[in-house]
Amino acid sequence: MRERGRAPVIKLKRAFGAVVEGEALVSREGFSPRYDLDRWTGLISRPGHALEGHNLKDKVLITPSAKGGIAAGWAFYDIKHKGIAPKAFVFGVTNPVMVQGAVFAGITITEGWARDPYAWIRTGDMVRVDPVRKTLELIKSRYAPKLSKDTKC
Amino acid sequence: MQLTPDEKKMLRGGQGAAVKEALELQIEVGRFFGAKRLVPISNAHMMGDIEVMGDSGKAFLQRMSESGAHCAVPTTTNARCIDFEYVEKLKQDPDEAAKERQLIAYLRKMDVITADTCINYQTLYQPHLGERVAWGDTGTVIYANSVFGARSNFEAGPAALAAGITGRVAEYGFQLDAHRNGTVLVNVKADLDDLADWGALGKLVGEAHQNYFAVPVFTGIKRRPTADQLKHLGASLASYGSMGMFHMIGVTPEAPTIKAAFGGGKPAAAMTITSRDIARVYAGYSAKNNPLNLVVFSGPQQSLFEMKNLARLLAGKKIKPRNQLFVTTSNGVKSAARALGYLASIEAAGGIVLEGVCFYILQNIGQMRVENGWSNLVTNSAKLANIIGAHKFNTILRRTDDCVHIALTGEDR
């Protein structure tokens, strides 16, 4: 449930990459570029995934955890070169493969958040990820300018 | 991060552009995790094939090899997506096979040993207690950390190659004492006989604590496990839980006692696994009224002991017509199995034994599934049962002899 009032700047624990702004794609489910993603179109393709049918391209993916194994390391580089990479990965917890893969591909990646982003940010909102300041910020809600209390993430 | 004079020189390009680029990648990753320094490694193991890396990864390898990159420590390759002997039979794409050959040539030019196995820890190299390595896939890492007491993080293909080229890794994660302590106590009250039972145990624990830094500590194991049993447990924990390490009291080298395994700390959680829990895992799979026509022993590749057992179970028998049985193993194990007659036994029964590959990354596996009318995939590997779902298989975990029974009869007993 979304909290009332002005959205905070959410502090992140660890971060790499350039400052990016983009549309949030928010998932309560973990993410694997191998298991969940069609690496030709950028669509989240695994049947039943919380983001099934959404396209990752140019989005800021906010997801609680990383899934999958070693092969993910090449997959980020692959989608970057196909022009279908997201602008950033914002993970609750991740593993080294995701970080190695994102650094190798030059995609912004972060891990850990000081407060729950799900209370503030929904799919479609514009957000900014700043790896230097280690922050995640809501720039513009796609919904009403005044944040209402009853909408679901 | 503190760098040695040698490392500073590498970073300035004093050992060539490839070394500089590899070290820069490692330093960025190390910074992310707060590493204070780089530490030397003795061995690297990398995943690199055309299915996982695509054309962009291949172009990267070409650039690295042409810029004179060269491995500073022995560096081996993981299972790949093509067994060249079977490209036609499996209707794999000849263009992709040609790319795979080029890619292998780039790796060899960099002095990478293209051994193509995910059981390097059984067949190629067994690091000792405290030895630092840079390995991937996940099954190799969890085995190194847990069973040998060596030190590795999950290293993605480009990261393991970078480590091979610089002979170093950033010191974070399982390279540090702090992350090697147990976090979850697992009381095992189950009888664990078959390899699949150990995989099922890994599934239950991995699913319940999905976290790279969760380190389960197993206690109550009744019989000292074999290397293959530990292999299936580790591969399953890594697959379902993204875990990189476990302890087993009295079995693994950093766990002589529960106190030692937890580093003097207390478990954050505890769970008990009974034989009923294991039975429930098997009961959770269903054929969904589709034929049981595909049985696969893969993920990880089969050891020589597993090959011997399959040969025994299949000796003098025939797989049911239109059923298929696949086995994947390394070149070395297949050669030994051939010399020992195990291969003849499996092939005479109608089984197909692929070398240097893993079933779930086979080039064209999705199309193969459709063309062969496969819906269900029966396996004794809990890991395979987990990961091949991405290719839209319905998977069924069964004990090894039940898998063979299904291959022979099409019936789940």
Image (tube, coloured by chain):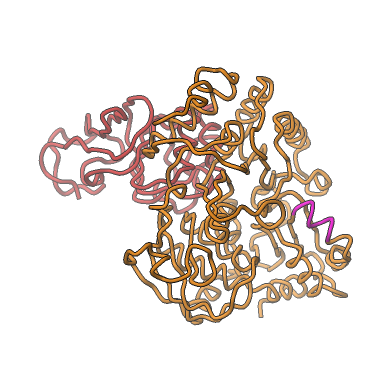
Prevailing secondary structure class for the magenta stretch in the rendered image: helix
Asked where in the image residue B65 lies, by quadrant, the reply is top right
Asked whether, in this view, residue B50 is left or right of residue B320, the answer is left
Instruction: Please tell me which residue is depicted at 61% across the width and 40% down the height of the picture.
Output: B52
Q: Colour of chain A?
A: red
Q: Residue lying at the far front in this picture: please name it.
A: B5
Q: Position of residue B382 (x, y in %)?
A: 58, 64
**Left or right of B248 in this view: B58:** right
Magenta run includes residue B179: no
- Residue at the spot 77% in from the left edge and 65% down from the top edge: B307
Q: In which quarter of the image is the N terminus of chain B?
A: top left
Is B305 positioned to the left or the right of A29 in the image? right
Instruction: Kindly identify the residue that appears in the image at 46 percent across and 34 percent down.
Output: A102
Magenta residues, as a range?
B330-336
- Count of residue discs: 0
Give the vertical position of B215 relative to A72 (above or below).
below
Residue A39 to residue A20: above or below: below
Camera-side residue: B47 or A141?
A: B47
Q: Where is residue B16 in the image (x, y as percent from the top left)?
A: 60, 19
The reply to whether residue B370 is in sight is no
User: From this viewpoint, is residue A68 visible?
Assistant: yes
**Residue B268, how many percent across, how many down?**
32, 64
Q: Is residue A151 left or right of residue B65?
A: left
Q: Nearer the viewer, residue B128 or B63?
A: B128
- State the quadrant of the C terminus of chain B: bottom right
Q: Quadrant of residue B107?
A: top right
Nearer to us in this view, B371 or B101: B101
- Letter of the orange chain: B
